[in-house]
Image (cartoon, grey):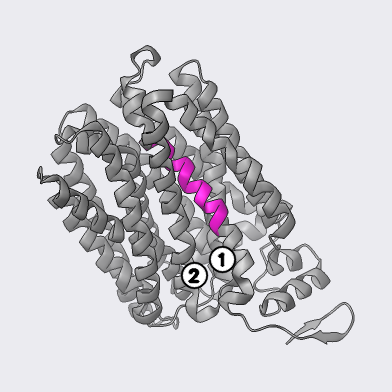
Amino acid sequence: MSPDTSHGTAIPSPPRTFRAVAPVIALCWLVVFFDGMDVNIYGAVMPHLLDDKGFGFTASTAGTIGSWTTFGMLIGALGCGTLTDWLGRKPMVTGSVALFSAGSAVCALAPSAAVFGGGRFLAGLGLGGLMPIGLAIVAEFAPPRRAALATGLMMTSYHAGGMVATGLGLALGPDHGWRVVFWTGVIPAVIAVPLVLKWLPESPAVLFAKGRTADASAVAARYGLPEPTRAEAPAAGAKGRFAAVASLFAPGTRAATPLLWVASFAGLLLVYGVSTWLPELMRASGYSLSSSVTFLMVINAGGIVGMLVAGRAADRFGAVKVSALWFVLTACGAFLLRAHLPLGVAYALVFVTGVWLFSAQVMVYAAAPSVYTPGQRATGLGWITGVGRTGAVVGPWLGGAVVAGGNASLGFTTFAAAAVLGAVAISLVPLVRRNTGHAPDVSGNRMGKILPEH
């Protein structure tokens, strides 16, 4: 049980099961669903944007604007930690959803490509802050031995949102235009924000750091969490933030940290490069417009299956092993897509590639808690996410450069090479950890608890 420090009595704690924390996971699932919808809307309407001759979009312009979005996400991911320390996790979630909804409205109203790009950058700020906070909340509240499964379960929402975005592009884009599709991106502010404000609990560690120890104990008791301690609380002030980052390069983690960053970079390059450019790459390979857009829905369907499979496999075999294998299989799938295959075979190959591609990246996040000590994990996860966003910036730009060159085969080869880079980086983490003699097991069967990320 968890003690109530404000009254000197003990409050019985319910067991930390999926049933006990279901409302928290469900709310995070919902906001990440809208995150996935907003990210994938751009790729879903890309063919219509390029065909809108009056708007002045080219493949090169589209790739650049895609990178503006992910550059905003990079800033959002790195900046959300300090803002979370000041404001709390619930305000950051609601603010992020409101921000990317506002960005979608700007895109729907944009009179020019430049204004449209500003809207995507604004949306990126909200999207970048939301994802790492959602991951941290779910991992903090999930049962410790099911942290990877809970992470994978939540991330199925991202791909469900991607499938809905693709469906909206197919249903609304041809007859009503791309602007109507972006207006649907305002829906999250109407639905998710009120629900989060009413039902999402604040992190006990954040409450503890803000001096609200009684509230921290109450939340911990309600959801069966351990009492937060000073070591687990977010570091205070700029000096504390610097010390937390510096600790990632202390003996025992200094070699593993850059490897995790590289793996995250490669994974997010794949996620955002493929999400933005898969329809155009498939169209350049000779498939019809409708079939090319449908491929985006198919790969996201594979992503949903992959999250569930990878989560269970990681809880049993270790997140590092699963991530490395999934990266290798992604490389194989991307390389095989270079060929113009029969439509049914192509759909099947895109589906299984989606099974591996998206969850390879998520398992990098799931590996972080077993690399870092409790006092390092929150900052470590934040920087893995933030630095990885540079891959999200490079992916759309790189895809645009390849498409502008008219060589779809080179695009798939480029994505395959990124997957190989991710596999090598994550595979080296256990080796460097063994060489330092550090205690946490990064390749074992059990996942540690991910502390709140900020």
Does 40 appear in magenta? yes
Does 3 appear in magenta? no
Residue type at numbered disc 1: Val
Picture coordinates of residue 398 (x, y %)? Answer: 28, 37
Residue type at numbered disc 2: Ala
Q: How dense is the environment of label 1, judged by Cα within 10 Å: few (below 14), some, or many (20 and up)?
A: many
Q: CA distance from mark 1 to mark 2?
A: 7 Å
Relative height, residue 69 to residue 129 (above, below): above
Q: Secondary structure at mark 1?
A: helix
232 with respect to 410 (left or right) = right
Q: Secondary structure at mark 2?
A: helix
- Find out whether the residues at labels 1 and 2 contact each other: C-beta distance under 8 Å: yes
Residue denoted by label 2: 150
Please, what is the dominant secondary structure of the magenta stretch? Answer: helix
Foreground of the two, 193 or 360: 193
| Image quadrant where residue 304 sits | bottom left
Relative height, residue 130 to residue 441 (above, below): above
Picture coordinates of residue 233 (x, y %)? Answer: 68, 68
Confirm whether residue 259 shows in the render.
Answer: no
Label disc, if present, on residue 138 of the rendered structure: 1
Dot 1 or dot 2, earlier in sequence? 1
Which range is magenta?
A: 29-43
